[in-house]
Image: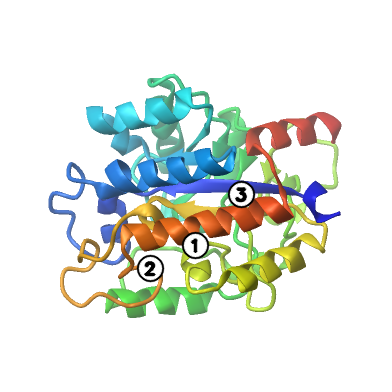
Amino acid sequence: MSAAVPGFVQVDVDGLWAVRDCYGRAERDSFTNDPCWSEGVTRLDSVFQQAGIDAAFFIVGRDMELDAKRRIARKLLHRGYELGNHGQTHRLGLTLETTGGILREVTHGHRALVQIGAKPTGFRAPGYDVDSRVLKTLVRCGYEYDASLLPTFAGPLLRVAQAWLAGRWIGGRRQYGRISYGRAPKQPYIPRLYKVRKPRFERDAKRIVELPVGVTPGLRLPLTASALFPLSRNRVRDLFMRMAARRRPVLLLLHAIDGTDCSRPIVFDTKTPAMAGFRMSGEAKERQLRMIVEEFAGCFAVTRADDFARRMLAHE
């Protein structure tokens, strides 16, 4: 029964420079010397190919300035993966921008992907930071779905955890959404453009699908590899089976760093936290990723989000 429930597997290709910025570390040479691309994306591609998973990779426009990263992105495109827009500069605090700034982030990121042959129709804001202006901008740019909303009340706690890992509070950011988004649907829906967390009720020609990021039952933590890495196969299977039993489509969100060897300090320069996979070797991560993806595919019918959103808009 549960195999008929749609599931989505997506990867945010946050380069090492973007991950270091998340934790307040200087970029240094991490833009050009970027194992998240050279190693992480390649390892995730291998996992998906072996499992027969039709995943999506959300790419930051800035990374397409480098030939080496463009070659990898084109390889993903030629393999048939969906490529989505993750903004131009990985702005953590997109909704702090002016409307013009939001438009630049979306359109410049879009243009970078079009230049390598992609036709992105899905967007995810860095840090799950979305509001009505972001949705209106996406509709204006012809996007079919947004996958930014995190339906959880735990945003403040997640921000505190982020600050604890970083070792300090970093200003000028807005991550993990708003507390009110905890009342948003946990399955794909067509939102009101002026109130993101509420389904649309009026007949309006301007529509877009909201594809919420999956959250775990109970605490509603983001359904990401960092939350699943510590779990055994049996616990991961039980979690996915319980989620599939609710008959709601679920988005499993991975990151390029999830496939990157962190047995050496690459994000944190000195003391590296033992959580979220920051001390795991590439081989250990690959084993866990294969297990996670296999169990997810066993509980959900893995589906391309762009096709799903297109069908949903056509039948709405």
Q: Residues within 10 Å of mark 2 (few under 14, many from 20)?
A: many
Quadrant hosting residue 1: bottom right
Q: Residues within 10 Å of mark 3 (few under 14, many from 20)?
A: some
Q: Which residue is mark 3?
A: 132
Q: Is residue 57 left or right of residue 294?
A: left
Q: Amino acid at mark 1?
A: Ala
Q: Which residue is mark 1?
A: 225
Q: Secondary structure at mark 3?
A: helix
Q: Height in image: 49 above or below 39?
A: above
Q: Disc 3 or 2, which lies upstream in sequence?
A: 3
Q: Height in image: 197 above or below 61?
A: below
Q: Amino acid at mark 3?
A: Ser
The CA distance from mark 1 to mark 2 is: 8 Å
The CA distance from mark 3 to mark 2 is: 34 Å
Q: Secondary structure at mark 2?
A: loop
Quadrant hosting residue 62: top left
Q: Amino acid at mark 2?
A: Gly
- The location of residue 200, given as percent across then percent down, is 79, 47
Residue at the image position 48 percent from the left and 40 percent from the top: 57
Q: Are marks 1 and 2 in contact (CB under 8 Å)?
A: yes
Q: Which mark is residue 277?
A: 2
Q: Residues within 10 Å of mark 1 (few under 14, many from 20)?
A: many
Q: Is residue 25 left or right of residue 111?
A: left
Q: Secondary structure at mark 1?
A: helix
Q: Which mark is residue 57?
A: none
